[in-house]
Image: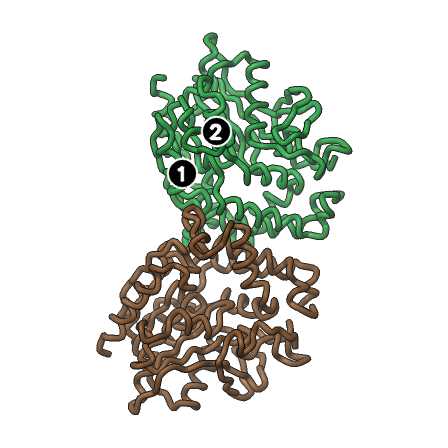
Chain colours: A brown, B green
């Protein structure tokens, strides 16, 4: 265990914990008393057909999904839908390296795959709420990976799906980008093979990790147009320290590494012996594939190639010079586009 | 001094050395007995108006410029032109941290700016060859930075100019990308503040540096289409080790850091108190601005914004899914496009 106040109810709550028991993982490990952290908004109707699952992205928690995507003014409207934001395993709120006791925490925390998350989430919502049908699964980045996994693994359950800024099968380029993030942390001698006392000891590695994110996460145009000014920062340096390092520097390095390993290996074609076309062909959901046009590592081209393999799907591009991290809702023009597409998708009969 | 056989005549020659004497730098340092390494191809005509200067990019030497860009089948045809490829200061062939004796080598090597390179090059070609007019200056990446500097600083001397995949004023995004490269090296404890015994001791930092290059230097599409196969590699891993680490891992870390510092600060508007429009307005050369469409850090948008400020200029985009490192000529479709544009530019009366 590494104490870390970042992952508190105060910062990320209110959230609940659901214990799914001992959970066997695809790679062979077991998480004992696996906890899923989640929040719900709205009410499940009697037919139990108005539920929406929202998984989380790398480093993200249910809180930012709530803040940016959920509300009566959004497509994810709690007056109409029962919205369940579920924290991915390893993100610091659900079972993760930093909150798992000796000897299974830190770098002994077992490898988790996107498929494990989705199995755990399905088990949870079925047991806790008796949900057998989802009106929508929607998530960004690693949340999109989970969205694809949901749609392929549970084709009869998922009626609609919207992967935003993410892919069904992670690309070689994206694997490599993620490797540079991993290496930024693990190359810090203060990381001590994962046996640091506090995340702040690993500040140099976390800063490098934040700065690689700053390069790839936004876009060249974001910096050219000085969008960091609109976000309230006085200089790029101020933005890098206060926003980027302020964000990642507070997190647990081993938690980030656990998610990064999972991200690198997201791949729905594991269900079909490596045949991506066959895997995506299994999807029965109506799907809107929604990349962000300036995304530097989940580029529209990669997303469109996959969309063409999904039977009942449309390609809906989001325009944002904030690039991949437009997901954070920092671009005032972003969420309206997402809402419009999701409104349309949710209105479609299934 | 750090012995390093990578920078030998065997690998990069034949090249000559020209001593420009003690050379005072813009930042206040002095390189004593500053050496410029260069190669020439073809003959200077009697009017001395057929000379072409080709500066080098980050990590590059005159050798790759010769191999990819110079030849009777290319626009840079030694049967018509007198072509001088000049190694930038810090690149390992010209005066550099690794070949400068104690106490001025290693991290004591003074900060060099793009403007210093261009002043040194001008001094050299004027003294050595009596050249007062250049038919063309053409270079890629940091070579493009030098090309812009040539055109702004010596507007009457430079008749034509072609910056490829580079900018006149480095962007904030690019500065940050370069910082991640710098940090990859300096975070390696084996770098020892620059006082390592051999570049191979810094292999971890150099590998991380190579892998960040692998992410940003090529393009997402390069990996998607598995272009590394066409280059003769069996896997991405093989490509990363044999090509990317094989390339950068052989170099001197302090030399790379010297160039990176310079790259970050390339800016012709230093001549006009920060007014980029005024600086680019001074250019008298006919200029073709030639970005590569899939370049992830010198994107066409940034290059086009500058081109519009250059009086007698055209925007000529090069298509290559090899992205920025298409400069290496690895894409069979690349050099033909460059040659066509340069042929056209060279045929224009001035």
Q: Are marks 2 and 1 in contact (CB under 8 Å)?
A: no
Which residue, given by chain and number where applicable, does mark 1 sit on?
Answer: B303
Residue B270 image position (x, y, % from top left): 51, 31
Pointer 2 residue:
B272
Q: Position of residue B184 (x, y in %)?
A: 62, 51
The residue most toward the left is A349
Residue at x 43%, y 44% (from the top left corner): B295
Crowding around mark 1 (Cα neighbors within 10 Å: few <14, some 14 to 19, many 20+) is: many
Image position, residue B50 (x, y; %):
45, 16
Q: Disc 2 versus disc 1: distance between alpha carbons?
A: 19 Å
Find the residue positioned furthest to the top: B46
Asked whether A10 or A105 is in front, the reply is A10
User: Is residue A180 visible to the viewer in this orientation of the structure?
Assistant: no
* Residue A100 is at least partly visible in this image: yes
Q: Residue at x 45, y 52 (%)?
A: A229
Q: Is residue A297 above or below residue A275?
A: above
**Foreground residue among A103 and B271:** B271
Q: Chain of mark 1?
A: B
Determine whether the residue tagged by mark 1 lies in a helix, strand or loop: helix
Image-based side of B105 in relation to A49, left or right:
right
User: Looking at the image, is B339 positioned above or below residue B83?
Assistant: below
Screen quadrant of the C terminus of chain B: top left
Quadrant of res B339:
top left
């Amino acid at each position: 265990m590494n104490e870390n106040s970042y992952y508190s109810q105060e910062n990320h709550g209110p959230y609940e914990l659901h214990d799914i028991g001992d959970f066997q993982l695809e790679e062979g490990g077991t998480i004992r008393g696996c906890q899923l952290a989640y929040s719900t908004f709205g009410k499940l109707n009697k037919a139990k057909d108005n539920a929406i699952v929202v998984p989380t992205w790398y480093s993200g928690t249910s809180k930012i999904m709530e803040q940016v995507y959920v509300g009566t003014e959004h497509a994810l409207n709690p007056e109409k839908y029962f919205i369940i934001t579920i924290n991915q395993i390893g993100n610091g709120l659900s079972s993760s390296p930093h909150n798992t006791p000796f000897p299974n925490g830190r770098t002994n925390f077992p490898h988790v795959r996107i498929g494990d998350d989705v199995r755990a989430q399905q088990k949870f919502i079925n047991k806790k709420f008796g949900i057998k049908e989802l009106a929508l699964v929607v998530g960004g980045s690693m949340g999109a990976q989970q969205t694809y996994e949901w749609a392929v693994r549970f084709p009869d359950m998922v009626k609609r799906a919207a992967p935003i800024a993410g892919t069904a099968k992670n690309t070689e380029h994206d694997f490599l980008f993620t490797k540079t993030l991993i290496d930024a942390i693990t190359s810090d001698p203060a990381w001590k093979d994962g046996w640091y006392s506090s995340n702040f000891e690993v500040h140099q590695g976390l800063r490098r990790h934040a700065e690689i994110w700053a390069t790839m996460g936004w876009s060249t145009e974001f910096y050219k147009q000085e969008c960091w000014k609109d976000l309230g920062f006085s200089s790029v340096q101020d933005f890098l320290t206060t926003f980027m390092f302020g964000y990642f520097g507070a997190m647990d390095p081993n938690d980030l590494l656990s998610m990064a390993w999972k991200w690198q290996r997201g791949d729905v074609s594991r269900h079909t012996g490596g045949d991506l076309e066959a895997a995506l062909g299994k999807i029965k959901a109506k799907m809107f594939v929604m990349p962000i046009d300036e995304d530097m590592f989940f580029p529209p081209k990669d997303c469109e190639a996959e969309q063409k393999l999904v039977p009942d799907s449309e390609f809906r591009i989001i325009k944002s010079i904030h690039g991949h991290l437009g997901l954070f809702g920092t671009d005032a023009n972003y969420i309206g586009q997402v809402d419009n597409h999701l409104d349309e998708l949710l209105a479609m009969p299934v």
